[in-house]
Structures are given as structure tokens and as C-alpha cells.
Image (tube, rainbow, N blue to C red):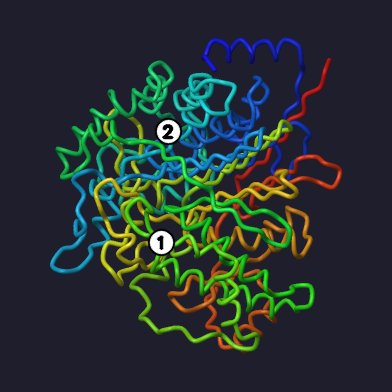
């Protein structure tokens, strides 16, 4: 639909209707629209988009663009995303905005003296892939939105210009990487004071360069970014700092529409994102395995044991098979029910299955289950349901801020397998399927998921937290549908996680000690973690309202409901 028509429609709707939008630190319920994110300003931006006549797609994009201003450690237009969208007419869109390796990338680009150097894939110029988030937001709006990119990015540019107050969550994430940010003068100038200290809680954080970039995109569209001043600025910085990315790489970036992974779990249709996300395949695979066990007949420790065993089997497959399907042969059968039935038979209810032993990766204890990345859930009463997971990879990505643009660039190249047997930041191993190649997209754990019952959406969810994203989504589904927990409890419940290597079960500190003991008795090594990940979800209440939930683990999260009432 043309921009002017869309604007006229929005203005017309505002003229005849009145609205009520409410933001809540806890779960929110409403009839006509719902948004859940990790930041109240982003949730508010989504609600504002609904109030201006937009739908769930507009709301999700508004929220995502605002997160790129107020949550710059997790996501932004310098990063990538996967967007899974159920349109009101039942069409499913799976939009791949994952970063892409530059044309000059080579398989061994991170190898020095025969060994992969994680500093190169995690920080600085070589760590950066061509970002896809902005291209996906634009694509999604053109396919299903009612408002324009200009409508949605302009309020976010105002926040960048006028500033927002730094909260404890932001300050603590910034403090954690201040030393690395200090290596890059532009990043230091924006994020640190003159003495090199990170901005504290209460600081009014203004980002005039980011505001300028957003306004350029509002004016010229995404061409400003992919084929204009932004791409030029990135190429200049790259050529001066040993990077490989050129303006041509930006111009060559395209959104890929993927075929979603569709599986069935206890009568629900689970729709996930296909590779280069590993999320859809392995959420389906784990649930397919678990479908062979009757949870209603099981005590909690046995249920946890079986779930852990299924996770372990899935992550072992992930390490071997998964990669960008445009470059590697990723078998569809991984998500097949038949395949899962063979795997289910391998599970012994009484003891942990032995796995090949491998040494624990260096530094695997540090930040393994961080909260990088962000998930946005949005839904409306027309039947548009959205799950967008977006990321820069680790906090502030590569730590590189392209001069004059205010945009932090991702370090998604670290999600490639730099060398067989060498784990990435998250301790994940990979094989040839996920090796670096020009134009290839690195494997991801991001798992935007939509669940249908009798063809109607009943849940949209996704998470942040590296490989725990996959297991968070699985556990929220089990908690909500098998154990019949209300959605806030399903998201808040204590989590466990196994990713095959290292061979141990990570458990949150809130997990029942008796359950931990029972897992130990079955032969599992236990690895305590303070908390794992951040999930956002929207479901449906018994009386047919939308319920939005942000993870209680994210201190700043917010769900917002929206009701339209005739005056
Ligand atoms: N960068 C984390 C992921 O995509 O899994």
C-alpha cells in the first residue's frame, strides 16, 4: 500500500475511534493489541503505533527500532534478526535478516598460527557481518503493516535526540564492557565520560548521530543505509581499520524469505524458524522427542531428566548438521516425527545417556548464558501475530561504532564455526556446515516461535540468551501446554538447560534442590547458574483476551495492552 494511503488510513482511524493503551511491569491483558519487550519505552512505542492505526507488525517494528535506541547493547540496526509473522489471512512469513559474511570473507579468516583467535571474531572490524534487521523491518511493513517506516522510525529518532535516562540494567551491561569499548574512540566518546568511566544510572543518554541516521532513513528509506551515506561511512571505517566489508556488500544484502519449520506437539501446531536459525529445527526436534513421553504420568525429576536428554540429543545434532542452508546440506529430517521416535528410544528413564567426552572449552564458564539479544512479541485482534528476535550477538556486538552514525555493529561472525572443535562465545561447537564463506549467514539459536491451535494463533514467543533460547522456548511450551501453567508462570518458572557440550545440566538457582539431587542421582553433572535468558510471550486468556508477558528476569521488561473503544 502506498505511503500516503497508509497515512490517511491511520489518521482516519484516529479521528473516529478512541483508544486506551496501558503499559505494565507485570503481565498485561487487552482485547485489541499486545506488545511485550524488555524496555518500557519500546513497549510504549509499540502501543503508540497501535493507537495510530497500526497493527501488530507496525507495533513490533516500532518497538524494535526503539530498542535500537534504548537497549543498544542487545540489538539495533547494526545487527540482524529473524521475524516470524502470522498474517491475519493465515499466511506465515519467515523473514531472515541474519547478518551475512562479506564477499571478501574466507574460511580461515580467524585462524592465526594454526588456531582460531576468538578476539578477531568477537571484537573489531573482522567480527562484523552485513546487518539485516533494518531490511527485515522494512520488508515486514511492506508485506503486512499499515504504517510507514517513516511513521515508526521518527518517534525513535526523537528519543535518540532528546535522550533517555540510563537505568540499572543498561548501566550494568555498559560497565561490563567499558574496557573493550574504550579501544574504539567513537564508542568511547558516546558511552564513556572523559575519564573513561561508563555512564552511570540516571545519566541522560543522548545519541545525536543515531538520531541523524534514523532521520536519514525516515527521509530516504532503507537506501540511506544499504546504498547511501551509511554504507559509505562503513566502507570508509572498514578500509581504515583492517575490515573486509565494502559498500557493495551492503548493496548486495537481501532479506530471505524462509520456509518455516512446522511440527505438531500434543495437538498444537508449532511454527518455528528454519536455518540459518537452529531454533525452529531443534525446538521441533526436542518437542517431537518429548511427545513420546506421557508427562501427566511422570514426576517432576523424571520429566526434567527426559527433557535434558532430549536437549542433549538435539544439540549434538546441531553441532554437526546445522548451517546456512544456502551453503550447507541441512537435512529436513531433523525435525521429523519419525526421526524423533528413534531418538526417544535412546533415552533411559533412570540414567543419563553417556556422551562422547570432550574437554570443557576455555572460558566456558564466563558469560556462557548471557542475556544478549532481545525478543519482541506483538499481536492484534485482527489475527496478526509477530515474533521478532533481534541481536548484535554479545553486548554492543563488535564494540565498533561507525563514525558519525551512532550505530553499533554486530559481532555475528563469531557465530560461524571459526575452526572445527573450537567453541564460539557461547561454548557451541560447529562443523563444516557452519564454516565461514563469503555471502553465508552464521548459524543462530534465535527461535521466534508461533503456536496454533485449530489454525488459530494461541502463543507467540521467543527469547534472548544464546543457546538457552532454544531450551527456554521448549520449557515455556511444556509449562504452558503440558503442565497448564498460566503464561506468566510458564515464563517465570525455573529453567534447566543442556547443550550437549559441555556435558552438564545448567540449572537456575531457583530450581528445586530435590530435583537437582534426583538429576545427580541419574548421573547428570550439575552446573548452577544465577539465571538463564529472557523470554517474551503473548498468549490468550480463557475469556479470549490477549495476555502479554515479559520475563521477570529482565528488571526493565514491560508488556502493554491496547483496547479500541468506539466513543
Ligand atoms: N548471536 C546469538 C545467536 O544468534 O544465536
Lower sequence index among marks 1 and 2: 2
Foreground label between 1 and 2: 1
Q: Looking at the picture, tell me which residue is in the foreground, 247 or 525.
A: 247
As measured in the structure, the alpha-carbon distance from the residue carrying label 1 to the one carrying label 2 is 25 Å
Residue beneath label 1, please?
322
Residue drawn at x 64%, y 28% as measured from the top left: 55
Residue 30, position in %: x, y?
Answer: 77, 36
Residue drawn at x 26%, y 66% as measured from the top left: 419
Residue beneath label 2, please?
134
Kindly indicate the quadrant of the structure image that contains residue 561: top right
The answer to whether residue 237 of the structure is visible from this angle is yes
**Residue found at the far right of this picture:** 543
* Discs 1, 2 touching: Cβ within 8 Å: no
Above or below: residue 148 compared with residue 355: above
Kindly indicate the quadrant of the structure image that contains residue 99: top left
Residue drawn at x 71%, y 58% as measured from the top left: 490
The answer to whether residue 26 of the structure is visible from this angle is no
Amino acid at each position: 500500500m502506498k505511503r500516503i494511503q497508509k497515512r490517511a488510513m491511520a489518521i482516519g482511524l484516529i479521528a473516529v475511534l478512541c483508544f486506551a493503551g496501558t503499559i505494565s511491569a507485570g503481565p498485561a491483558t487487552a482485547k485489541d493489541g499486545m506488545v511485550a519487550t524488555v524496555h518500557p519505552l519500546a513497549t510504549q512505542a509499540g502501543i503508540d503505533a497501535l493507537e495510530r492505526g497500526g497493527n501488530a507488525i507496525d507495533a513490533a517494528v516500532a518497538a524494535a527500532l526503539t530498542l535500537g535506541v534504548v537497549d543498544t547493547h542487545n540489538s539495533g540496526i547494526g545487527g540482524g534478526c529473524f521475524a516470524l509473522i502470522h498474517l491475519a489471512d493465515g499466511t506465515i512469513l519467515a523473514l531472515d535478516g541474519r547478518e551475512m559474511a562479506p564477499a571478501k570473507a574466507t574460511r580461515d579468516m580467524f585462524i592465526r598460527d594454526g588456531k582460531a583467535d576468538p578476539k578477531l571474531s568477537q571484537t573489531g572490524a573482522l567480527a562484523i557481518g552485513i546487518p539485516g534487521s533494518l531490511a527485515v523491518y522494512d520488508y515486514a511493513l511492506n508485506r503486512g503493516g499499515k504504517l510507514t517506516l517513516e511513521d515508526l522510525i521518527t518517534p525513535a529518532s526523537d528519543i535518540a535526540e532528546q535522550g533517555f535516562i540510563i537505568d540499572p540494567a543498561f548501566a550494568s551491561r555498559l560497565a561490563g564492557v567499558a574496557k573493550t569499548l574504550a579501544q574504539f574512540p567513537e564508542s568511547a566518546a558516546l558511552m564513556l565520560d572523559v575519564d573513561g568511566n561508563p555512564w552511570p544510572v540516571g545519566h541522560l543518554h543522548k545519541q545525536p548521530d543515531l538520531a541523524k541516521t534514523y532521520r536519514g532513513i525516515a527521509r530516504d528509506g532503507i537506501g540511506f543505509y544499504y546504498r547511501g551515506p551509511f554504507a559509505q561511512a562503513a566502507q570508509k571505517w572498514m578500509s581504515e581499520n583492517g575490515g573486509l566489508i565494502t559498500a557493495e556488500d551492503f548493496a548486495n544484502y537481501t532479506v530471505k524469505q524462509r520456509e518455516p519449520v512446522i511440527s505438531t506437539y500434543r495437538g498444537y501446531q508449532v511454527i518455528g524458524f528454519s536455518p540459518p536459525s537452529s531454533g525452529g529445527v531443534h525446538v521441533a526436534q526436542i518437542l517431537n522427542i518429548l511427545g513420546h513421553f506421557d508427562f501427566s504420568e511422570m514426576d517432576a525429576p523424571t520429566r526434567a531428566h527426559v527433557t535434558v536428554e532430549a536437549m542433549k540429543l538435539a544439540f549434538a545434532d546441531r553441532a554437526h548438521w546445522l548451517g546456512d542452508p544456502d551453503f550447507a546440506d541441512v537435512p529436513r529430517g531433523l525435525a521429523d516425527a519419525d526421526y524423533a521416535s528413534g531418538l526417544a528410544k535412546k533415552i533411559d528413564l533412570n540414567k543419563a545417556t553417556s556422551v562422547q567426552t570432550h574437554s570443557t572449552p576455555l572460558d566456558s564458564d564466563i558469560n556462557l548464558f548471557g542475556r544478549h539479544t532481545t525478543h519482541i512479541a506483538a499481536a492484534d485482534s485482527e489475527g496478526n501475530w509477530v515474533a521478532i528476535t533481534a541481536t548484535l550477538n554479545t553486548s554492543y556486538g563488535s564494540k565498533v561504532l561507525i563514525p558519525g552514525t551512532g550505530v553499533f555493529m554486530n559481532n555475528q561472525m563469531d557465530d560461524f564455526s571459526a575452526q572445527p572443535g573450537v567453541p564460539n562465545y557461547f561454548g557451541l561447537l560447529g562443523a563444516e556446515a557452519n564454516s565461514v564463506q563469503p555471502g553465508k549467514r552464521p548459524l543462530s539459536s534465535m527461535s521466534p516461535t508461533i503456536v496454533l491451535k485449530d489454525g488459530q494463533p494461541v502463543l507467540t514467543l521467543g527469547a534472548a540468551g544464546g543457546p538457552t533460547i532454544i531450551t527456554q522456548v521448549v520449557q515455556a511450551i511444556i509449562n504452558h501446554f503440558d503442565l497448564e501453567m498460566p503464561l506468566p508462570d510458564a515464563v517465570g518458572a525455573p529453567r534447566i538447560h543442556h547443550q550437549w557440550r559441555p556435558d552438564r545440566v545448567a540449572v537456575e538457582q531457583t530450581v528445586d534442590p530435590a530435583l537437582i539431587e534426583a538429576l545427580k542421582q541419574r548421573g547428570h553433572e550439575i552446573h548452577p547458574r544465577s539465571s538463564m535468558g529472557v523470554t517474551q510471550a503473548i498468549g490468550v486468556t480463557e475469556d479470549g483476551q490477549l495476555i502479554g508477558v515479559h520475563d521477570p528476569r529482565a528488571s526493565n521488561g514491560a508488556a502493554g495492552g491496547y483496547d479500541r473503544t468506539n466513543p
